[in-house]
Protein backbone atom coordinates (compact mmCIF):
# COMPACT_ATOMS: atom_id res chain seq x y z
CA UNK A 1 0.00 0.00 0.00
CA UNK A 2 1.23 3.44 -0.86
CA UNK A 3 2.25 5.38 2.29
CA UNK A 4 0.65 8.54 0.88
CA UNK A 5 -2.67 6.75 0.50
CA UNK A 6 -2.42 5.20 3.96
CA UNK A 7 -1.74 8.59 5.55
CA UNK A 8 -4.70 10.14 3.70
CA UNK A 9 -6.97 7.30 4.82
CA UNK A 10 -5.83 7.66 8.42
CA UNK A 11 -6.46 11.41 8.32
CA UNK A 12 -9.96 10.79 6.94
CA UNK A 13 -10.68 8.24 9.66
CA UNK A 14 -9.56 10.64 12.37
CA UNK A 15 -11.97 13.31 11.10
CA UNK A 16 -14.96 10.92 11.29
CA UNK A 17 -17.50 11.67 14.03
CA UNK A 18 -17.34 9.60 17.19
CA UNK A 19 -20.35 7.26 17.22
CA UNK A 20 -20.04 6.23 20.85
CA UNK A 21 -20.41 9.62 22.48
CA UNK A 22 -23.05 9.86 25.20
CA UNK A 23 -26.00 12.21 25.11
CA UNK A 24 -25.54 15.73 26.42
CA UNK A 25 -27.34 16.84 29.57
CA UNK A 26 -29.63 19.14 27.56
CA UNK A 27 -30.76 16.26 25.37
CA UNK A 28 -31.52 14.15 28.44
CA UNK A 29 -33.53 16.93 30.07
CA UNK A 30 -35.43 17.57 26.83
CA UNK A 31 -36.20 13.85 26.55
CA UNK A 32 -37.59 13.59 30.08
CA UNK A 33 -39.60 16.79 29.61
CA UNK A 34 -40.94 15.44 26.29
CA UNK A 35 -42.12 12.20 27.90
CA UNK A 36 -43.78 14.11 30.76
CA UNK A 37 -45.42 16.52 28.31
CA UNK A 38 -46.68 13.64 26.17
CA UNK A 39 -48.19 11.95 29.21
CA UNK A 40 -49.71 15.18 30.50
CA UNK A 41 -51.21 16.19 27.18
CA UNK A 42 -52.77 12.80 26.50
CA UNK A 43 -54.02 12.39 30.05
CA UNK A 44 -55.37 15.93 30.28
CA UNK A 45 -57.13 15.79 26.92
CA UNK A 46 -58.81 12.49 27.75
CA UNK A 47 -59.72 13.53 31.29
CA UNK A 48 -61.31 16.78 30.15
CA UNK A 49 -63.06 15.04 27.23
CA UNK A 50 -61.92 17.70 24.79
CA UNK A 51 -63.84 18.13 21.53
CA UNK A 52 -62.61 16.37 18.40
CA UNK A 53 -61.27 19.67 17.00
CA UNK A 54 -58.87 19.86 19.96
CA UNK A 55 -58.20 16.13 20.30
CA UNK A 56 -56.90 15.72 16.76
CA UNK A 57 -54.12 18.34 17.16
CA UNK A 58 -53.18 16.85 20.56
CA UNK A 59 -52.78 13.39 19.02
CA UNK A 60 -50.90 14.74 16.01
CA UNK A 61 -48.56 16.68 18.30
CA UNK A 62 -47.88 13.48 20.25
CA UNK A 63 -47.12 11.62 17.03
CA UNK A 64 -44.85 14.47 15.89
CA UNK A 65 -43.01 14.31 19.21
CA UNK A 66 -42.37 10.56 18.94
CA UNK A 67 -41.42 10.79 15.27
CA UNK A 68 -39.21 13.80 15.96
CA UNK A 69 -37.15 11.96 18.57
CA UNK A 70 -36.90 8.96 16.26
CA UNK A 71 -35.72 11.21 13.42
CA UNK A 72 -33.23 12.97 15.67
CA UNK A 73 -31.61 9.71 16.73
CA UNK A 74 -31.60 8.22 13.25
CA UNK A 75 -30.47 11.21 11.20
CA UNK A 76 -29.13 14.04 13.32
CA UNK A 77 -27.40 12.68 16.41
CA UNK A 78 -24.51 10.94 14.59
CA UNK A 79 -24.28 8.12 17.07
CA UNK A 80 -24.09 4.36 16.96
CA UNK A 81 -26.67 2.38 14.96
CA UNK A 82 -29.91 1.32 16.61
CA UNK A 83 -30.14 -2.07 18.29
CA UNK A 84 -33.16 -4.35 17.84
CA UNK A 85 -34.52 -3.33 21.22
CA UNK A 86 -34.20 0.36 20.37
CA UNK A 87 -35.89 -0.18 17.00
CA UNK A 88 -38.70 -1.99 18.78
CA UNK A 89 -39.13 0.66 21.44
CA UNK A 90 -39.08 3.50 18.92
CA UNK A 91 -41.70 1.80 16.76
CA UNK A 92 -43.79 0.72 19.76
CA UNK A 93 -43.94 4.28 21.09
CA UNK A 94 -45.61 5.38 17.87
CA UNK A 95 -48.02 2.46 17.77
CA UNK A 96 -48.88 2.68 21.47
CA UNK A 97 -49.92 6.27 20.89
CA UNK A 98 -53.10 4.76 19.45
CA UNK A 99 -54.24 3.61 22.90
CA UNK A 100 -54.54 7.05 24.51
CA UNK A 101 -55.51 8.59 21.17
CA UNK A 102 -58.61 6.40 21.17
CA UNK A 103 -59.47 7.80 24.60
CA UNK A 104 -58.84 11.37 23.48
CA UNK A 105 -60.77 11.15 20.21
CA UNK A 106 -63.66 8.78 20.86
CA UNK A 107 -64.65 6.74 23.87
CA UNK A 108 -63.09 8.10 27.02
CA UNK A 109 -63.46 5.57 29.85
CA UNK A 110 -65.19 6.59 33.03
CA UNK A 111 -62.32 5.46 35.28
CA UNK A 112 -59.14 7.44 35.76
CA UNK A 113 -57.13 4.21 35.49
CA UNK A 114 -58.51 3.64 31.98
CA UNK A 115 -57.18 7.07 31.04
CA UNK A 116 -53.85 7.09 32.90
CA UNK A 117 -52.58 3.62 31.98
CA UNK A 118 -52.65 4.04 28.17
CA UNK A 119 -51.10 7.52 28.38
CA UNK A 120 -48.41 6.29 30.77
CA UNK A 121 -47.67 3.25 28.60
CA UNK A 122 -46.99 5.42 25.57
CA UNK A 123 -44.91 7.97 27.51
CA UNK A 124 -42.86 5.30 29.31
CA UNK A 125 -42.15 3.50 26.05
CA UNK A 126 -40.88 6.77 24.57
CA UNK A 127 -38.77 7.35 27.67
CA UNK A 128 -37.42 3.79 27.47
CA UNK A 129 -36.41 4.41 23.86
CA UNK A 130 -34.65 7.65 24.77
CA UNK A 131 -32.83 6.17 27.77
CA UNK A 132 -31.62 3.25 25.68
CA UNK A 133 -30.25 5.70 23.09
CA UNK A 134 -28.47 7.80 25.72
CA UNK A 135 -26.01 5.13 26.73
CA UNK A 136 -22.59 5.41 25.13
Image (cartoon, rainbow, N blue to C red):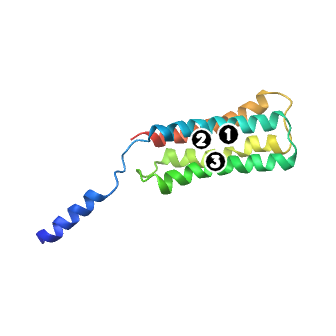
Which of discs 1 and 2 lies nearer the camera? The answer is 1
Horizontal relation, residue 44 to residue 2: left or right = right
Circle 1: element type: helix
**Earlier sequence position, callout 1 versus callout 2:** 1
Label 1 environment density (alpha carbons within 10 Å; few <14, some 14–19, many ≥20): many
Residue in the picture at 34% in, 55% down: 17
What x and y, as percent, mark residue 78?
A: 42, 54
Q: How many numbered marks appear? A: 3
Horizontal relation, residue 8 to residue 101: left or right = left
Residue in the picture at 86% in, 37% down: 49
How far is mark 1 from mark 2, CA to CA?
A: 9 Å
Label 2 environment density (alpha carbons within 10 Å; few <14, some 14–19, many ≥20): many
Screen quadrant of the C terminus: top left
Horizontal relation, residue 118 to residue 75: left or right = right
Label 3 environment density (alpha carbons within 10 Å; few <14, some 14–19, many ≥20): some
Residue in the picture at 50% in, 38% down: 28
Q: Which mark is residue 38?
A: 1
Q: CB under 8 Å between callouts 3 and 2?
A: yes
Horizontal relation, residue 124 to residue 41: left or right = left
| Residue that carries the numbered disc 3 in the rendered image | 65
Residue in the picture at 75% in, 40% down: 100
What x and y, as percent, mark residue 57?
A: 77, 50
What x and y, as percent, mark residue 1?
A: 13, 70
Q: Quadrant of residue 38?
A: top right
Circle 3: element type: helix
**Earlier sequence position, callout 1 versus callout 3:** 1
Q: CB under 8 Å between callouts 1 and 2?
A: yes
Whether residue 59 is situated above or below residue 15 in the rendered picture: above
How far is mark 1 from mark 3, CA to CA?
A: 8 Å
| Residue that carries the numbered disc 2 in the rendered image | 126
Q: CB under 8 Å between callouts 1 and 3?
A: yes
Amino acid sequence: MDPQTAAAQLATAERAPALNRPALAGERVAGVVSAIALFGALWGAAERRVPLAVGIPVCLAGLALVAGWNYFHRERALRRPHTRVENGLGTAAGFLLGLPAGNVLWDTPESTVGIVVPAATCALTLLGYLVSRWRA
